[in-house]
Image: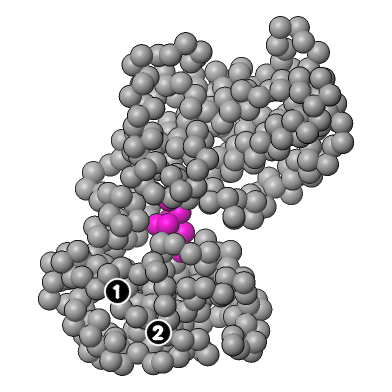
Amino acid sequence: MIPSATFGHWWSGRPRLSQSPRECEANVPRTWFVATFYENVVEPILKEHFPDLSYTACRIGLGSEVLGYDTEISADHDYGPCLQLILAEERFPAAAVQIMDVLDSVLPATFEGWAVHYPTNVRPPRDSEERMLGSDHGVEVYTIAAWCDRFLGRVFPTELTARDWLSYSEQTLLTVTAGAVFRDDAGELSALRARLAYFPRDIWLYKLAAQWGRIAEKRAYVGRAGDVGDELGSRVIATRMVGNIMRLAMLIERRYAPYPKWFGTAFSRVACASDLAPLLEQVLAARIWRERESALLEACRFVAELQISRGIPGAIAPVMGSLKDRPYRFVDSVKIFDAIRAAIKDEDLRLLPEFGGADQFLNSNFVLAVPTCASAATGALLDTTSRTPAGWR
């Protein structure tokens, strides 16, 4: 049974450490829980048994607490103190097994009422040949290359190409840029997090333009479906449009979007959400298509004007669009798409069709969560651009 007193401590506010671990940007309970586990248990063990060890200690990878969204319900599976130790490539063969043997021997059975040894299916194997090492507790040992290969599907000896950036879902980039770093002697992880902190300018503009392209695809469909009496179909389309506008807002605010379970939570924390969310709620609450269409129009106007206020290159004032003189009302998202795309300096990127990054044209979380799958899908799509199918702008 989970001790209620522990929940009362860790899920009530943000407890302060007597000495905050260096670079711990945690502002959520369980990451602070892991920080104190490191500071009070793991760090003293390493200092006693390996006083000259240079290493990185962090909580990154998978898990709601890495994103900062964990609640009491998060503790119903794979739960306990978990952190990663990262060793230099040349030190791993000699040190990793020794470190794990010591941890296996001296880690306590519990910490703050939680089991230190607990089952989960996401730990690395106990195989030092793969430069990663796990056990029956939550402390994992890696090299930075092995961690990247496991969670990102590649190592990072050089800068990412445009194809590389587009092949990563934003939820994958959050596995390394979210979470907390408690110690980083070599600075290797901090450097990687800085490199992947957000998209380069032209990739960002291309994804912004592509997101307006997503909106343009269905710009008149809410009205067209409603016009023939298909209110259910109109609602479905409008709901998808709301999701597209939320993702657009996160791009404008330069925030990576997590996987679907936490997408709305992440959106609610961006600066514009307090103004935009009520407009989107009006879209979802509308009972007839004309009300739905009007609310979408206002939401699109809002994000178009937000781009201008944020100084986004190529941003233009929203204007009303038309489609073959049909009586449907919408912001001309094609004009916005064209204006932002024109601000892209990289010619190859500027000339790509508006399919965007992996998480803009794929909606299978299974594919998006596996970097090799997302990369394969993105590569296949990029490889078709030389044939320029009919209908691509």
Residue that carries the numbered disc 2 in the rendered image: 117
Q: Is residue 177 magenta?
A: yes
Tell me, yes or no, if residue 87 can be seen here. no
Q: Would residue 295 appear left or right of 68 to someone viewing this image?
A: right
Image coordinates for residue 391, horizontal then vertical, percent: 51, 13
Name above or below for residue 190 compared with residue 56: above
Place of residue 275 in the rendered image (x, y in percent of width and height, measured from the top left): 75, 44
What residue appears at the point 39 percent right and 92 percent down from the top-left corner? 108
Give the number of the disc on residue 336: none
Q: Which residues are magenta?
A: 172-179
Q: Is residue 297 left or right of residue 75?
A: right
Residue under the image location 49 percent in, 37 percent down:
362
**Looking at this view, is 371 or 179 the one in front?**
371
- Which residue is painted at 22% across and 48% down in the image? 157
Image x and y of residue 364, in percent: 50, 43
The three-letter amino acid code for the residue at tag 1 is Gly
Q: Which residue is mark 1?
A: 134
Q: Nearer the viewer, residue 194 or 165?
A: 165
